[in-house]
Image: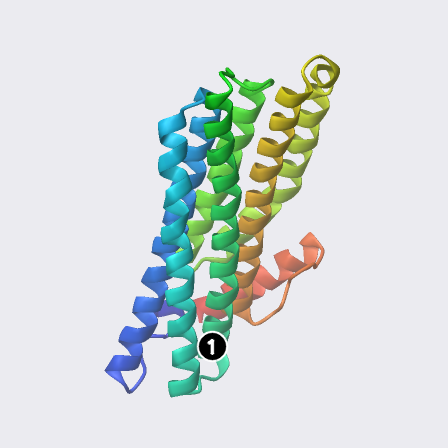
């Protein structure tokens, strides 16, 4: 938080409120990340027990979203923040929504693992491609969490640059699975839905990094071309170095 000088308020309690908010967001993000990793592994292994465990884990993510949202709104009411502090609260509220949606996508995969195990299914088609896509998306989420922890716009930009690559990998994986659609449509559809869940998690990671660039530099880069995102990230880095 030092780059944003969020620990330099007159009120020590205010500093602690902001730090607690930050830590809760990071905890929520780590839970979403762990749910992604576990749910994909459960799908690939048709692990019913793991699927059930991870299906229930989404409750904790939902609980954190509610508590962080309540705390953020409380800070808005009590402190009436301005400038950077206001951007922080706005970014937090948007970020936890994307983390919650990551958890929802992971939960879909956990439930898929349960169903596939109940049906006696084995590995889904194109399992190796799904595993590779999952590893790349996990890398995006890991770097998103690192960006939030270190408050680095350059690192957040690197995540945004990966999003078109993830989209291309997703389309290639679906294309590779098309031949199995006629032979085994149920299995092929599971591939589509699992791959789609991973691609959406990548989108949410990119969204969070855009919020971080907004927090650090003040420019709203949602839906902006990548070159504009890069310029905003450069500006944010310059501000943080002052």
Check the image and report above or below for 206 versus 38: below
Q: Residue at x 75, y 16 (%)?
A: 182
Q: Residue at x 56, y 52 (%)?
A: 157
- Mark 1 burial class by Cα count in 10 Å: few <14, some 14-19, many 20+: some
Q: Position of residue 202 (x, y in %)?
A: 56, 44
Q: Residue at x 40, y 24 (%)?
A: 47
SS for dot 1: helix
Tell which of 86 and 147 is nearer to you: 86
Q: Quadrant of the C terminus?
A: bottom left
Check the image and report above or below for 101 versus 112: below
Check the image and report above or below for 92 versus 183: below
Q: Quadrant of the N terminus?
A: bottom left
| Rendering colour mode | rainbow
Question: How many numbered circles does the render carry?
Answer: 1
Q: Residue at x 56, y 72 (%)?
A: 218
Furthest-left residue in this view: 12
Furthest-front residue in this view: 118
Q: Position of residue 66 (x, y in %)?
A: 41, 64
Residue 150 visible within the image: no
- Residue 152 left/right relative to 2: right
Q: Quadrant of residue 201?
A: top right
Tell which of 106 and 155 is nearer to you: 106
Q: Position of residue 149 (x, y in %)?
A: 37, 56
Q: Position of residue 180 (x, y in %)?
A: 70, 15
Residue 199 visible within the image: yes
The residue at which mark 1 appears reads as 84
């Amino acid at each position: 938080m030092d780059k944003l000088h969020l620990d330099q308020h007159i009120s020590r309690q205010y500093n602690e409120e902001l730090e607690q908010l930050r830590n809760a967001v990071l905890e929520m993000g780590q839970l979403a990340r762990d749910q992604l990793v576990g749910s994909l592994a459960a799908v690939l292994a048709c692990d019913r027990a793991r699927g059930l465990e991870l299906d229930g884990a989404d409750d904790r993510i939902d609980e954190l979203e509610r508590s962080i949202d309540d705390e953020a709104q409380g800070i808005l009411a009590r402190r009436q923040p301005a400038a950077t502090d206001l951007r922080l609260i706005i970014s937090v509220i948007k970020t936890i929504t994307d983390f919650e949606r990551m958890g929802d996508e992971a939960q879909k995969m956990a439930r898929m693992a349960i169903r596939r195990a109940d049906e006696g299914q084995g590995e889904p088609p194109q399992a190796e491609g799904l595993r590779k896509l999952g590893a790349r998306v996990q890398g995006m989420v890991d770097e998103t969490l690192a960006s939030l922890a270190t408050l680095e716009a350059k690192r957040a930009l690197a995540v945004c640059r990966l999003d078109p690559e993830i989209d291309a990998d997703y389309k290639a994986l679906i294309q590779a699975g098309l031949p199995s659609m006629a032979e085994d449509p149920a299995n092929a559809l599971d591939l589509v839905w699992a791959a789609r869940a991973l691609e959406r998690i990548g989108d949410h990671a990119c969204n969070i990094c855009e919020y971080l660039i907004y927090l650090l530099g003040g420019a709203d880069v949602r839906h902006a071309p990548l070159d504009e995102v890069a310029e905003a990230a450069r500006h944010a880095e310059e501000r943080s170095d002052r």
